[in-house]
Amino acid sequence: MSLIVVQSVAAQAVFDSAPDRARAALESIESEAHGTLVEMRRLLGGLGPRPEGEGTPSPPETLEQLVARVASAGQPVTAEIDSNVHAGGSLGLTVYRCLQEALTNAVKHAPGSPTSVVVRCAGGRVEIEVENGPPARPAEPGEGGRGLAGMRERVGILGGTMAAGPTARGGFRVQVSMPTGDLP
C-alpha cells in the first residue's frame, strides 16, 4: 500500500508536465493495487480452513517482474537475480515479500535514488541484499509501518537472519539470509 501512495503522489506531481511519466505511474498503481487485492483475498481466505491439496500461496509475480515494475515507476534499479532462486512455497513467498518490502522502503524513503538488488543462492542459503543511495529528493512524510519488523519475523520463522541499517554513504541496506532446506 505504501508503494501505491508514493506512486500516486508522484503521478500527481508530474501530471501536467510529464503526462507519459504520470501514465506509467498510474499503470504501476493499477498493477500494485491488483496484486494487493489478490493478496488480501488470499490472506482472508487463509483465515479459514484450506481446501485439501492447496499449499502455500505463490507470489503474484516473479522477482524480475517486481523489480521491473518498481523501475517503471521511476526508481532507478539494477538487479542481479540468480536463476537458481525458486519462487515457490514458503521460502519463495518470503523471498518475494522481503524484496517487495525493501524496494517499497527505497521508493518511500529515497525516491529517485539508485537502488541495487542482489538475490542469490550460495552455500545452501538464499541471500538478498537491497541497497539504495542517499535520497535524490526529499521523501514524502509518512507514518512508520511494520515493514522491517514483519520482514524480520517472516525470515526468522524460516530460520534466517535479517540486518537493516544506514550505509556509510548515507543510504540504506537490507540484508537477508535464509536456509534453502526443506521448508514448510
Image (spheres, grey):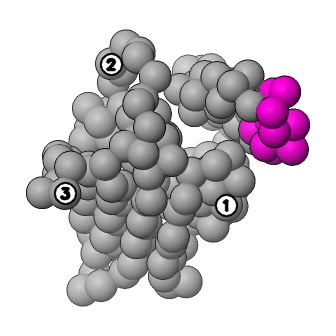
Kindly indicate whether the residue at mark 2 contacts the one at mark 3 (C-beta within 8 angstroms).
no
**Measured along the vertical axis of the image, is residue 126 above or below residue 6?**
below
Q: Residues within 10 Å of mark 3 (few under 14, many from 20)?
A: few
Judging from the image, what secondary structure is the residue with disc 2 in?
loop
Kindly indicate whether the residue at mark 1 contacts the one at mark 2 (C-beta within 8 angstroms).
no
Q: Disc 2 marks which residue?
A: 144
Q: Disc 3 marks which residue?
A: 169
Seen as rendered, the residue at the extreme top is: 143
Q: Position of residue 37 (x, y in %)?
A: 73, 27
Task: Name the mark nearer the viewer: 1 or 3.
Answer: 3
Residue stretch in magenta = 15-26
Q: Residue at x 36, y 21 (%)?
A: 145
Q: Residue at x 81, y 27 (%)?
A: 15
Residue 20 magenta? yes
The CA distance from mark 1 to mark 3 is 25 Å
Q: Find residue 68 and name its label.
A: 1
Earlier in the chain: of badge 1 and badge 3, it is 1
Amino acid type at image mark 2 = Gly
Quadrant of the rendering where the N terminus is positioned: top right
Earlier in the chain: of badge 3 and badge 2, it is 2
Q: Residue at x 39, y 78 (%)?
A: 120
**Measured along the vertical axis of the image, is residue 17 above or below residue 179?**
above
Judging from the image, what secondary structure is the residue with disc 1 in?
helix
Judging from the image, what secondary structure is the residue with disc 3 in?
loop
Q: Residue at x 12, y 57 (%)?
A: 168
Quadrant of the rendering where the C terminus is positioned: bottom left
Q: Position of residue 100 (x, y in %)?
A: 50, 47
Q: Residues within 10 Å of mark 2 (few under 14, many from 20)?
A: few
Amino acid type at image mark 1 = Ala
Closer to us: 106 or 39: 106
Kindly indicate whether the residue at mark 3 contacts the one at mark 1 (C-beta within 8 angstroms).
no
